[in-house]
Amino acid sequence: MNTVPTAPPKTATGLSVQGLSVRHGHHTILHDITLGPFPPGVLCAVLGPNGSGKSTLLRAMGGLVPARGRVLLHGQALDGLPLKARARLCCTLPQSLPEPLRLSVLETLLAARRVAHPAQADDIPAALGWLERMGIASLALRPLNELSGGQRQLVGLAQALSRHPRALLLDEPLSALDPHYQYRVLALLREEAARSGLVCIMVLHDLNQALNWCQTACILHEGQVRAFGAPRTILTPALLHAIYRIHACVDTGTQGQAFMSVQGVETADQVPQKV
Amino acid sequence: MPEPAPTHPALPSALPSTAKAQAACAALNRRRQLVLALLAAGLLLSILADCAIGPASLSPRALLHALLTPDTAPPGARLILWRIRLPYALMAACVGAALGLAGAEMQTVLANPLASPFTLGTSAAGAFGASLSIVLGWHISGVPQTWIIALSAFVCSMLSVWLLETLTRLRQTETGRAETSTVVLCGVALVFSFQALVALMQFIASEDTLQDLVFWTLGSLTRAAWPAIGLLALALAGTLPFALAAAWRLTVLRMGEDRAASLGVDVPRLRRAALLRISLLSALAVAFVGVIGFVGLIAPHIARGLVGEDQRYTLPASLLSGAFILSTTALLARVLVPGVVVPTGIVTALVGIPFFLTIILRQKPGA
């Protein structure tokens, strides 16, 4: 396996990071990551095994954890901006679901908007429009504490989308959703990205979704970038084995769709190295 | 990729129209305003009852006469009302309001349903500050003794919330949120530490000051005085606008610290400002009437139950609920045993413990 295959970004469009490092105590979570650009208008994926630093990468790009290095959105540095201005440009959706509150779905969206613009009047039609596009308009007046986890995840997504950011960083946005809503959200995000030139980066675990819906992907392993590029090109059997410890390859289906076929998995624990 | 089917079996078909949603939102807000108005009316009635009922009972007419036109009222009624009953009743309302507001903000910024000035040691720290200034006999010429006690209580309360914040930060999870148990355990440690320090003050105090100190440990409204009421009312009037200005940010913070930060809320700054307001309110309450527990814990729960979690309404509702609870409890403390005023702190604790247990038992395991 070759080392970091990325060169410093040359183009100014999209979101790129340069020399990003995150430490938590004495533990380094991200090692000097240079990555990108993630292009606007399409979906991009961040892949990698558990604990590889995917969430931390997203949180560092969004400015939610202290990090060293640069984050550039269309050539503009985000890292020097105050949190409020940064959040307006680049919205990071956390992995955790919105807490089950006694607050209606509609109010949840309105509050998210009012935080950015406290003086503006409530824009109920716009908020309802987003709920309708997500397919949860019927829940608009229900309190969050009566909703299921998946429904709350959709509310969180609608909250992020309704703020019209220029970059959207989603941490496992499909984790609690049934297949209908998983593909509905993917379709909505792809449509919205194409329409508004949004940079949309999401952490995914389902490699088939990355293969078929995302144009660009980066693969993290132990806090470092192992590959960056089109998912169909970078997800080679050698890489899948090195990263996920599975024996698998990417096949093409009858309608041109790509899918992973897994032949086996390594279950033996790695022999600890001698010191 | 095949396009997703337009409908989904789990979806109810009735979608609210914009007009319907707007009407529903307006109705909800009207309902909340009505609840606030009812709470305020209940508080007013309770204050009036507190003024009227007692060993020398005042009729409603005599009460209003002495209240509205004190110059022409009989001197006996005037004296009872303006010197004894009204300060007692207003002090109860102001302390309850301060604790209710402080508790509501504390439960939000610490993301903890068990947070309150009493349970997490802020009140105990205030009591220590107050007793410290009494025992050491601090005084500055020209400054009333009350103010010095209040200032000393405030400094110690601030120290305790700062300690609490720092201790819980040390053990936060990776998402930046301290676990419920960490906050509560650190708070318990602070309660015990400051109670021990208060006991130490009692131990070294002279016999005269000891009597003063016992008053703090019990929590009593009988020494209510007009300057103290004025100062507390001023503190409430000074902090409430700032709390309300932060209402949207506090509402978003209720959805989770991570989410609030992702929406552009500077959570550490919001938390620091709220903790400053909390220590001011609870320190003044403690400095004037001693440690009164459970009001700050229960009032926010009642407020959320009544008006939901839009903090524009939750904060004032918690303030009014706190004032109403303490006002009625104060009345209870006076009429429970005829001729004796039971220290209010004892009554609130006895009434509050069942609520406290209910909150613990209703918590989801692992939350």
Image: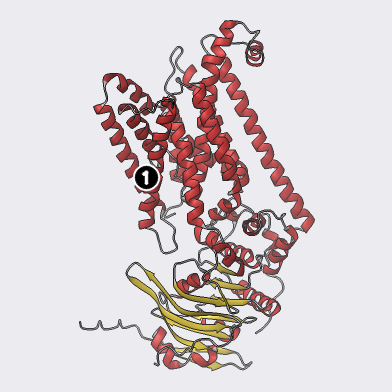
Viewport quadrant of the N terminus of chain B = bottom right
The residue positioned 34% from the left and 71% from the top of the image is A27
- Residue lying furthest right in this view? B19
Instruction: Locate residue B64: give its quadrant.
Output: top right
Is residue B258 in view from this perspective? yes
Query: Would residue A208 be visible to someone looking at this image?
Result: no
Q: Is residue A258 left or right of residue B144?
A: right
- What's the chain of the residue with tag 1? B
- Along the line of sight, which residue is nearer the eye, A121 or A144? A121
Q: Position of residue A11 (x, y in %)?
A: 58, 87
Q: Tell me which colouring the rendered structure shows.
A: secondary structure
Viewer-side residue, A78 vs B110 = A78
The residue lying toward the viewer, choosing from B355 and B265, is: B265
What x and y, as percent, mark residue A202? Answer: 55, 76
**Above/below status of B298 relative to A219:** above
Residue holding disc 1: B187
The single residue placed furthest to the front in the displayed view is B141
Q: Residue at x 56, y 30 (%)?
A: B324
Residue drawn at x 54%, y 63% as measured from the top left:
A83
Report the amino acid beneath label 1: Gly
- Image quarter (top left, top right, bottom left or bottom right) of the C terminus of chain B: bottom left
Q: Secondary structure at mark 1?
A: helix
Task: State the image coordinates of residue B243 (x, y, percent, origin top left).
Answer: 56, 45
From the viewer's perspective, tell me whether residue B214 is left or right of residue A275. Answer: right
Q: Give the total number of marks visible in the rendering.
A: 1
Q: Pointer 1: residues within 10 angstroms few (<14), some, or many (20+)?
A: many
Rendered residue at 39%/88% (across/down): A242
Q: Is residue A226 above or below residue B53?
A: below
* Left or right of B288 on screen, residue A169: right
Q: Nearer the viewer, residue B237 or A112?
A: B237
Q: Position of residue B2 (x, y in %)?
A: 67, 83
Q: Is residue B61 left or right of residue B356?
A: right
